[in-house]
Image: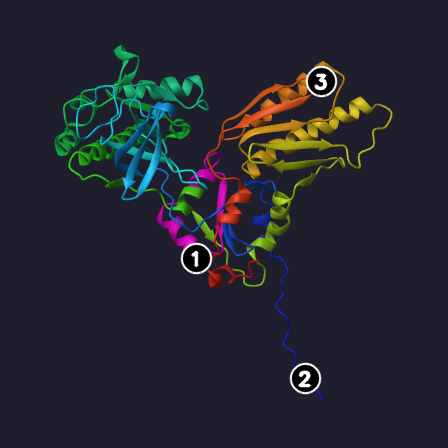
Amino acid sequence: MSRNIMPKASVTITEEERSFRNVQSGKLLFTCWKSRSCALLIRNRRLIEAAFSSGEAGKVGAVYIGKVKNVAHNIDACFVEIARGETCFLAMKNAGQPLLLNRSYDGRILEGDELLVQVIKDAQKAKRASVTAQFSLDNPYFVLSFGTVKTGFSTKLDGKQKNAIKQILRNAGILDADARDCLRRDIAGLMPSDEEDRLKMQDSLPPTGLIVRTKAGEAESAEVLLEAFYELLGQYLKLIRNARFRSCFTCLKKAESEIVSLADRLTAENKTETEIVTDRKSVYEQLTAAGFSVRLYEDTFLSLSSLYGIDSKMKTAFESRVWLKSGAYLVIESTEALTVVDVNSGKCEAGKDPQEVWHRINMEAAEEVACQLRLRNLSGIIIVDFINMRSPYKEQELMQYLKELTAKDRIPTQIVDMTRLGLIEITRKKINKPLKEQFQNCSAADGEESCKYGVH
């Protein structure tokens, strides 16, 4: 008895998919792994950075009218309530000259004071969220910060670009050359007259600093730069004006969508050279609405994860052992106090000149250490135990190479020193949770959508 057997659909990678996968420019993938929403930055087929979406709306970047609940002089900080029952930590070093709304600032912050604060770190484990009174607003070209009068430029702008931008801002009357290129304090001269009349602001600008971002050097014209500045300044002045007429605990500026925030953060280095791809329609709609160029992946036979080999890449990011091409390997272990990285020779044979082999392994390990710090988002104190070398010259060469590698990290990373035991000390600023902690705290994604295109 014969049977009708339906032919299987081909899962062969098409030429189009092969070209997408093989392209050397960056890829930012929004997909699911282990039923959890994640964003993955891939460059040259290597996973550079990863982040999991918690599914909860974060508050980093949001600006509130808060009330000081109590001042803790012993730790040089105070606790500010931004909503009923939600208290945040404010270090006095982040208070500066706050914008008080219930009285004039006299150099003191007192219990009961109402002030503008911006969330800079979400609550983590038993720690409260952190806020600053030096709030800021930004766009791709500029950052305006309350509580300072300094003007700064991105370190990625060269001298010629800095001078050209500075001249544009001077000619427009934005920077005061007689006041060390600080922002002009009189709003009537700082903004176009029609904007100043419409805003009906006070005559003088509060202490405000300006930071010129890297993208300002890529602006098509002076008009584009000035338009971006005036738009940002208008938002900044409106926020300050509205604060004077709103009640306590009002949110004056909401935090960005977590998806949009991830896209901004992970494409910050090479936005124009990074293609964003997703197999989730909800993510596609959010990012498209936010102005990102996004490609929706809809192949039902070959998942986005399979196309880019996400499963093996992510497993490597969670394992304690990381193999190197030479046969050596790293062991990465995190504790409450610090993270320890041990370099082992593994399967690599020493040969006739062991010192040269150990040097080559250490240099290879340094590259992998820099990559793993960023991929796993390790922060705080990090100790790396490289293979001991007898030559002080080669030790210095290793230190210098590690400094050059970590300088490319967008999160501030400092190579402190090498101890007498040959351990290299590193500190990396804590901005987001480590990757493993993000995964553990991440709730499962929408099952129907996450499995739609065969996601793991």
Q: Which amino acid does label 1 sit on?
A: Lys
Give the foreground label among 1 and 3: 3
**Whether residue 326 is situated above or below residue 404 in the rendered picture:** below
Give yes or no for contact between labels 3 and 2 (Cβ–Cβ under 8 Å): no
Helix, strand or loop at label 3? It is helix
Of the numbered discs 2 and 1, the one sitting upstream in the chain is: 2
Q: What residue type is labelled 2?
A: Arg
Give the foreground label among 3 and 2: 3
Q: In front here: 126 or 213?
A: 126
Find out whether residue 279 is within the magenta segment.
yes
Look at mark 1 in the image and give the residue it sits on.
281
Q: In front here: 365 or 246?
A: 246
Asked if residue 195 can be seen in this view, the reply is yes
Please provide percent x and percent y for residue 266. 48, 39
Residue occupying the far front of the picture: 74
Residue in the image at 32% along x and 24% along y = 210
Find out whether residue 147 is within the magenta segment.
no
Q: Which colour scheme is used?
A: rainbow
Q: In front here: 71 or 278?
A: 71
Give the foreground label among 2 and 1: 1
Number of the label disc, if any, that sits on residue 3: 2
What is the distance, in whole Å, between disc 3 and disc 2 at their CAs? 72 Å
Please provide percent x and percent y for residue 189. 18, 21
Helix, strand or loop at label 1? It is helix
The part of the chain drawn in magenta is 263-292
Residue occupying the far top of the picture: 178
